[in-house]
Amino acid sequence: MSGDMVITMGEGTCGIAAGAPEVTKILKERFPEATFKAVGCIGMCHLEVMVEIESGGKSWLWGNVNKKNLPKIVRFHRGQGDLPEAMLIRSTDNTETERSQYLTRQTRIALRNVGELNPTSMEQFRARGGYSAFENIIKGGMTPEQVIEEVRVSSIRGRGGAGFPTAVKWGFARSAQGEPKYLVCNGDEGDPGAFMDRSLLEGDPHSVVEGMLIAAYAIGASKGYAYIRAEYPLALKHFAIALDDARQAGFLGHDILGSNFSFDIKIKEGAGAFVCGEETALLASIEGQRGMPRIRPPFPAIQGVFGKPTIINNVETLANIPWILKNGGAAYARIGTEKSRGTKVFALAGAVKRGGLVEVPMGMTIRQLLEEIGGGSASGRPLKAVQLGGPSGGCIPESLFDTIIDYDAINATGAIMGSGGMVVTDTKSCMVDLARFFLEFTQIESCGKCTFCRIGTLRMKELLTKICDGSGTLEDIDTLEELAQRVKDASLCGLGQTAPNPVLTTLKYFRDEYIAHVTEKRCPGGVCKGLITHTILQDKCTGCSICDRYCPVNAITGELKKPNTWVIDQKICINCGMCVEVCNPDAILAA
Amino acid sequence: MSKASLEATVDPEKVQGWITKIGSDSSAAVPLLQAIQSEYGYLPRKAMNLVLEGTEINASQLFGVATFYAQFRLDPVGRHMIKVCHGTACHVQGADRLNTSLRHALGIDDPKEDTAANGSYTIENVACIGCCSLAPVMLIDGEAFPNLKGADAQRHLVKHAKTKGEVLPGHTGDGDDQTDAKEK
């Protein structure tokens, strides 16, 4: 069965983290005759390591592969063993499994190539129609205005978070005076909980390059920057390879494809500042300055990097552009809702069974996304909320899960679409702790220019910490709410204006949890360290001592193999939860 | 071991090489600092001074940039870097316990300290490395370890230390015994 075998390995960052290199090494030893192909993450991160094996005109996609279960797959493909169904995602024989619904429920436009091609192969990209949208523009004599019109017809809005209509932005830059004009790709995805840009840049970099080329042509830019997070080394590597290959193939440089259009792209590595997601801060960073935002106007489209007209588009927006030009703006506009057209990529993580990247048409409900694609709760406990849009976003409670995915419908809940980070929580989570987590993040990331953002977020974090520690009062909740509103109103840029969103939405939907913390000194989710205690359940304890060995503060004492002797000294215990993690018979209660 | 003993020896020719390659105007500030840090793990004062001498960048801009961005550090680091992801997904899945467990194994009691006293490992918290579906995640010298519990983090550290010949100055819960801890 192994003749003409092609083995495709998911080698995105998540695949590598889950152990793909080790699996590849073993497969290469077992199937030396096979051809190996490395592709980016196809989005099913929960099933990494993933391997697709094609042989004899058939194919099998395997998930959760590791060195222990690999022999079963090897035996099957050698015709010496049964089909290991537990690992099968889909096959040409056995059509679909429950696991493959993850992919069949999606509409993949931005992610059309991710996981399907080797991201470092220009040949494979060209074979899937890559660069043909751009070639059609140049060879077909399409004017920049016609390109902008096609994008206008598609009604695509910026996928970086704010949702500004892309064609309008391009139109401003097209008519702006000043040379040279710049096009910047914002690949500095700073939202904790979002990883769609990483996946696109490392899994399909040429589509982003092609999107940049089309955008540059439309606005008349001759210089481009790709501002990519330094924390994404594989994305940086693959993007650099794509640039070299595109340059060699004549898609970047002078007089591209014999036209008068010249354009080239430089990579700038981000240096770890969330505020650089704000476009004026990002421009300052490219110029070698501290990434501090400035007042707009003038807008970057008029006066951007080095004082020249500049457009900044997000990675996902740019990845959609070649598809729009190839299939027509109208085809894109047919997908989605009245005011939010097309698809949106979400990074699904947290308490769901099937986490990863999903691309769905606008208009699907949050519940459909979480249950039909995400598979519902991973723990069996009921889902409680979804945190959407990262630190700039908010928490949507389970009672609003029938909200449709649409910029306006999401905004009406108090959250935002943002770049698409979706972190799901179940009942064993604390909304006050989550708000504190985000405030800690934004307080550290505030550039410090505006007093309300610099000091206001710090005070908000202090109040939240006080509530989590069990020393908060009802007045603190009122002060927190008032301060949140003021920080929102008095900050210059998006960071400060949205930093209070996690607080405001949790106060709106989960105020009872705040009240339980301050009046009953109780954390309903059992998370806040100051409000829980750890005790050993004597009837379950076996006296194995593992809790003692892992306790970082030596709070646990007892005699080996004598269950009834084990106790936790509450004066020493820091409620870190290490003992709960390691206890085999579940003999430690945190409440 | 004092911090001074971790100070790197700076090669002026290397710094000059980066200036020649990257540029000497003010927009080169961030990439120059990135080149220095990727070589030494932090920004040695001597290398910073060489940049000031060899470029148009002034001290206010260079130090302003170095202290503004989270990526840069002015203190020496241990021989190995542990980066613990504290993105939202990692946070809700218990990333804090990774720090507790690692600090315990490295004997780092002072909350302001991030490097083991023997200079072996430095723990750094990072905002999000984009492996949210495999949370919580940490990196040791760039190698990623997914789906961790606190005890797993310690076990990986113990294993790493063994292969690198490093001594862990703190206490481990028999961290190298894979069969010992709970499997959920």
Image: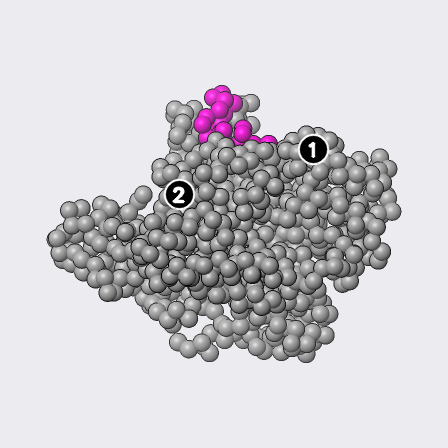
Instruction: Please say whether residue A105 is visible from this viewpoint.
Output: yes
Q: Is residue A105 above or below residue A196?
A: above
Q: Residues within 10 Å of mark 1 (few under 14, many from 20)?
A: many
Residue type beneath disc 2: Asp
The residue at which mark 2 appears reads as A426
Q: Is residue A591 above or below residue A372?
A: below
SS for tag 2?
strand
* Residue at image point 86% right, 44% down: A259
Q: Which residue is mark 1?
A: A333
Which residues make up the magenta segment?
A89-109
Pointers 1 and 2 within a single chain: yes
Three-letter amino acid code of the residue under disc 1: Ala
Which color scheme did the rendering employ for the protein? Answer: one colour
Figure check: A291 above or below A390: below
User: Could you tell me which secondary element the residue under label 1 belongs to?
Assistant: helix
Q: Residues within 10 Å of mark 2 (few under 14, many from 20)?
A: many
Residue at left offset 74%, top offset 57%: A299
Residue A390 at x, y percent in the picture: 53, 50
In the image, A481 versus A384, the foreground residue is A481
Disc 2 sits on a residue from what chain? A
Q: Is residue B1 magenta?
A: no
* Residue at the (84%, 50%) spot, across then down: A175
**Residue A242: horizontal and vertical position, in percent?**
68, 47
- Number of numbered discs: 2
Residue A291 appears at what percent x and percent y? 64, 64
